Image (cartoon, helix red, strand yellow):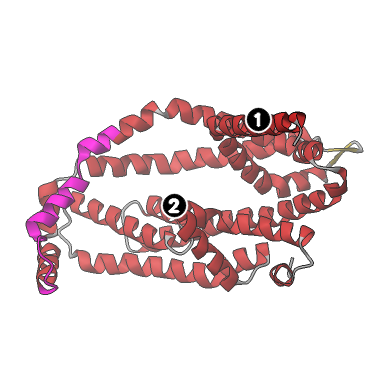
Amino acid sequence: MKTNQIVRFVLGIVGLIILVWFAWQVKQVFVYFAVAIVLALMGRPLMSKLSQIKIKGHSFPDWAGGLIVIVTYLVILSLFFKFLIPILAQQIDIIVNLDVELLLQEFSGPLASLEAWFKDMNIKGINRETIQNELVGYLNFNSVSSAFENILSGLGTVLVAFMSILFITFFLLKDKNIVNNIIDTVTPDKYLKSIHNVLSDTKDLLTRYFIGVAIQVSIITTIVSVGLSIFNVPNALLIGFLAGLINIIPYIGPIIGATFGISLSLLSYVHMDLGMDLGPLILKILSVFAVAQLTDNFVLQPLIFSKSVKAHPLEIFVVIMAAGMIAGVLGMILAVPTYTFLRIVGKEFFQGYKVVQGLTKDL
């Protein structure tokens, strides 16, 4: 190897290391871009409708369409704060001012049963006192207050992130070809057509997917909120919204949501000292979440995952489980959009392989 080739190779390695280091230092910017891309994809249908409007023979300006989409997002966020923040504040007040002694008294029966079960299973070192201490530890309100203080101190960072995401989203909506132009500058000419096909298919499929996820969250929120309201469960809207949001995590999300919903409901009833049997209440809450889970599994997920990204439900299940084993909860959330993108790339560049043909036949 000649001296100039060695120098170029070393400089290339050094440049790559510097590039990776720089990307890691500004990784938050990439997160902002990722969130903005999702918001831009979800806003594409509205942008398409607005672009069809003619004003004195001229098309509706893209900047105005992008502004309308941003305003729409802000209105939705404002409604969220208007309805849910007061409920959330009320729930926080209940948790902070909860009488722990009353809570332990209410749960004395279940704790005794749990202690007896551990004894029957010959599990040593766990008794009623241990369980009570653990419960009190989880309800350490000093740590709760500290957590909220940390949240308040981080509001400046959140505000910067919020404004940055809105700014990026606006320009992604306004300049439709901005991503294409960036990619064109780094793509060899012979691959341009294939790359454009990948970008076009990715935009179409992921737009439908993310809109479907938003619809899924809305439907689960509605089912849980209405169901819990029928049973007079306090803060049904807050529990429903959190359940819908957590439901984004495939398969384990509903379990987490149900656990969270039961916990908030029980704390509210104990705080109000209603003196009621909590067993039937738990069954009612579980029945609501069961209806939501069945609706999600047999109606929403097949429509969203199978129809929007054109993949078999079993195929999606395997992909989500594998992603969960590799990258945990975050992997499960990102599994479907990532797998969709990889299938599109495979169809465009590796169509000659039978495996790729089988996985991409419906695209």
Label tally: 2
Task: Provide the residue span drawn in magenta.
Answer: 120-146
- What is the x, y in percent for residue 124? 10, 64
Q: Residue drawn at (63%, 57%), measured in percent from left and top?
A: 209
Disc 1 target residue: 15
* Secondary element at image label 1: helix
- Residue for point 30% across, 44% down: 91
Rendering coords of residue 304 (x, y %): 61, 63
- Point out the residue furthest to the right here: 57
Residue 343's place in the image compared with 8, above or below, is: below
Quarter of the image holding residue 178?
top right
- Residue 96 or 135: which is nearer the viewer? 135
Dividing the image into 4 quarters, which one contains the N terminus? top right
Secondary structure under tag 2 reads helix
The dominant secondary structure in magenta is helix
**Viewer-proximal residue among 92 and 42:** 42
Left of 353 or right of it: where is 189?
Answer: right
Q: CA distance from mark 1 to mark 2?
A: 47 Å
Query: Residue 89 placed where, x, y %?
Result: 33, 39
* Disc on the earlier residue, 1 or 2: 1
What is the quadrant of residue 329 in the picture? bottom left
Which numbered tag is attached to residue 241? 2
| Residue 226 seen | no
Taking the spot 49% from the left edge, 64% from the top edge, the residue there is 321
Badge 2: few (under 14), some or many (20 or more) residues near its Cα, within 10 Å?
A: many
Mark whose residue sits in front, 1 or 2:
1
Whole-percent x, y for residue 205 in the image: 70, 57
- Verify whether residue 43 appears in magenta: no
Front residue (pair 113, 69) = 113
Q: Amino acid at mark 1?
A: Gly
Q: Within 10 angstroms of label 1, few (less than 14), some, or many (20 or more) residues?
A: few
Is residue 4 or residue 181 the one in the foreground?
Answer: 4
